[in-house]
Image (cartoon, rainbow, N blue to C red):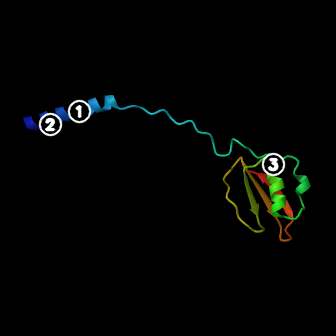
């Protein structure tokens, strides 16, 4: 019994000493993805109805300042996650641009 009490006392002392040596890490300061280069879909109406091509996609990406570009074909589901640095361009079966949205 005395041996068990002695073992418990030594264990408690060691645990206290180890806890005193532990350091607390500072929380990381992180920004949400895409906040460095947010997309701005102002004045994109001129692209509506245009034929969806790689060159048009690059022009829209440059115009909006988006880092990420995504074509959205007809009848296609997309994720609902919000990315401030993404532009999505939707087109119809005739390959005509029908929507341009940031996020």
Q: Quadrant of residue 40?
A: top right
For image coordinates 76% across by 63% down, the residue present is 72
Q: Which residue is mark 2?
A: 7
Q: Which residue is mark 3?
A: 64
For image coordinates 32% across by 28% down, the residue present is 20
Q: Position of residue 51 (x, y in %)?
A: 87, 65
Q: Which residue is mark 1?
A: 14
8 up-or-down from 65: above or below: above
Give SS at disc 1. helix
Task: Name the N-terminal-most of marks 2 and 1.
Answer: 2
Task: Name the N-terminal-most of marks 2 and 3.
Answer: 2
Query: Badge 3, how many Cα within 10 Å: few under 14, some, many 20+?
Result: many
49 up-or-down from 16: above or below: below
Comparing 72 with 67, the one in front is 67
Q: In 3D space, how far apart are the residues under numbered discs 2 and 1 (Cα atoms)?
A: 11 Å
For image coordinates 35% across by 32% down, the residue present is 22
- Asked if labels 3 and 2 touch by Cβ distance under 8 angstroms, the answer is no
Q: Position of residue 94 (x, y in %)?
A: 86, 71
Q: In 3D space, how far apart are the residues under numbered discs 2 and 3 (Cα atoms)?
A: 68 Å
Q: Does residue 62 appear to the left or right of 27 in the view shown?
A: right
């Amino acid at each position: 019994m005395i041996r068990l009490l002695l073992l418990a006392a030594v264990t408690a002392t060691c645990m206290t000493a180890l806890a005193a040596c532990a350091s607390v890490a500072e929380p990381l300061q992180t920004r949400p993805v895409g906040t460095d280069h947010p997309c701005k879909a102002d004045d994109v109406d001129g692209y509506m109805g245009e034929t969806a091509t790689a060159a048009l996609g690059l022009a829209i990406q440059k115009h909006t300042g988006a880092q990420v570009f995504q074509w959205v074909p007809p009848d296609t589901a997309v994720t609902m996650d919000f990315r401030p640095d993404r532009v999505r361009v939707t087109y119809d079966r005739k390959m005509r641009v029908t929507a341009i949205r940031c996020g």
